[in-house]
Amino acid sequence: MAATVRRQRPRRLLCWALVAVLLADLLALSDTLAVMSVDLGSESMKVAIVKPGVPMEIVLNKESRRKTPVTVTLKENERFLGDSAAGMAIKNPKATLRYFQHLLGKQADNPHVALYRSRFPEHELIVDPQRQTVRFQISPQLQFSPEEVLGMV
């Protein structure tokens, strides 16, 4: 048993040495390293850029605002996101999806699904037979799960 421990120690030391080298390289690059952070809420989202030694900067969207609505409008061959999708909600409420994060991974018989149906009666929610979750049916050809809509955002 002692022989196996001796064999494993050089591997562990090699792994720790490799981690130390990678961390040293990462720290050397830390002045150029920038991280994008996304705050995704149920109503709006903000995107920030974080760099070491620099205050966090909120990114402006196309309309020069810091908050972007988490809204998706789906038409037959077009997809609108953010403010343009929120503007189309008046013309086409059935194809405009909002507050869909509350449905992520929920079974069709979940109380959150019933609450969503009562709040947004314009959306047609159908049951996915494979997963037993809900899907948005925009038209007979367009059906999307809440996870797919979140992926579009």
Image (cartoon, grey):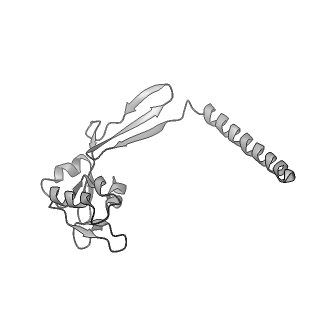
Q: Quadrant of residue 28?
A: top right
Name the residue rendered at 17%, 49% in the picture.
Answer: 87
Closer to the camera in the image, 7 or 54: 7
Quarter of the figure that contains the N terminus: bottom right
Judge from the rendering whether residue 11 lies leftward or rightward of residue 52; answer left or right: right
In the image, is residue 142 above or below residue 38? below
**Residue 30, percent across and down?**
57, 32
Q: Quadrant of residue 129?
A: bottom left
**Residue 96, percent across and down?**
21, 57
Outermost residue, left side: 91
**Residue 2, percent across and down?**
86, 50
Closer to the camera in the image, 140 or 104: 104
Is residue 114 in view? yes
Numbered circles on residues, count: 0
Outermost residue, front side: 1
Name the residue rendered at 32%, 61% in the picture.
Answer: 106
Judge from the rendering whether residue 82 lies leftward or rightward of residue 31; answer left or right: left
Name the residue rendered at 35%, 36% in the picture.
Answer: 59
Outermost residue, right side: 3
Is residue 93 in view? no
**Residue 54, percent across and down?**
46, 26
In the image, is residue 45 above or below residue 140? above
In the image, is residue 125 above or below residue 62? below
In the image, is residue 122 above or below residue 130? above
